[in-house]
Image (cartoon, rainbow, N blue to C red):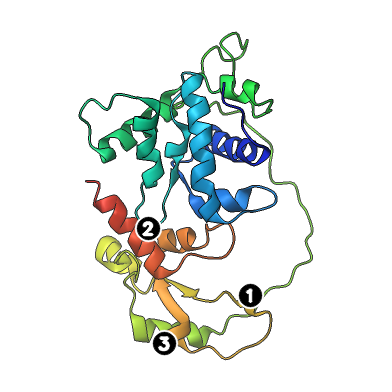
Amino acid sequence: MTELTELQVKLAEQMLLSVYNREMFVTYSELASRITPPINPRNVGKNIGQVSILCHELDLPLLSAKVINKTTATAGVGYYALYETLGIPTGGKTEEELYYAERKAIRECQEWYRLEDYLGLTIGFPHPDDPMLSRYDPFETVVIPQKEGKKKEYYISKYERNPENRRNAIKLHGTRCMACGFDFEAVYGKAGQNIIDVHHIRPLSDVGEETTINPEIDLVCVCSNCHRIIHSKKNGVYSIEDVKSMIEAMKSKD
């Protein structure tokens, strides 16, 4: 049985957490930043390949299919080479077909506890004899009502926004999302007039002090969905071009 290095175990743990948390995928750079200490994304590929070799030995899907290149939105070339290395029949499928089939197998697999146990991890995948859930259903979420609304006091620093900059950004860029093209007014009519988020390309929290903002080059107009994606990056923010690339990559799959 393949023995993993300490680094490879850390990467396997983060990939398993990605499965457990039902993430669609994780990029090489995200995975590299999630382990402690973080590593160069260039060192991810060869190490997660070893994790997939162990998965194959345990009769599990190739877990490295969860990890994608941010630019191409698919697995790296090393992933496809594993099929030949491991002698896995491809059935005449293209690389893209193999990739999506493996992603589906990862989602539907109910035995990830075997890799978790083998590596001595404590993630929480249920075992077949689990009294609460005999089989893991990747499409079912068990919801337990929780309390919320308790009053708490916070002492934080907020960075002042100048409403004139927002108005000028809209004058310059309009109210159509600069990432996906969504137009609130075109969809919702009068109720959607002048509704748009104005995003600082460089967050004010990164600047840390009062600064002059040029609405033409420092601000962009985006819909609330794209704005949320922009700020979803673990460390930093995605650029407008990053979001456009994500959208185009998904469109190309249709």
**Lower sequence index among marks 3 and 1:** 1
Q: Horizontal placement of 138 versus 125: left or right?
A: left
Give the labeled residue for mark 1. 206
Give the labeled residue for mark 3. 216
Work out how far the residue at label 3 is from the one at label 2, CA to CA, in angstroms.
27 Å
From the viewer's perspective, is the residue at label 2 or at label 1 nearer? 2
User: Compared with residue 239, is residue 83 higher up or lower down, i.e. above or below?
Assistant: above
Work out how far the residue at label 2 is from the one at label 1, CA to CA, in angstroms.
25 Å
Give the percent coordinates (x, y) of residue 162. Answer: 56, 85
Residue flagged by tag 3: what amino acid is it? Answer: Glu
> Helix, strand or loop at disc 1?
helix
Residue flagged by tag 1: what amino acid is it? Answer: Asp
Give the labeled residue for mark 2. 71
**Lower sequence index among marks 3 and 2:** 2
Work out how far the residue at label 3 is from the one at label 1, CA to CA, in angstroms.
19 Å
> Helix, strand or loop at disc 2?
loop
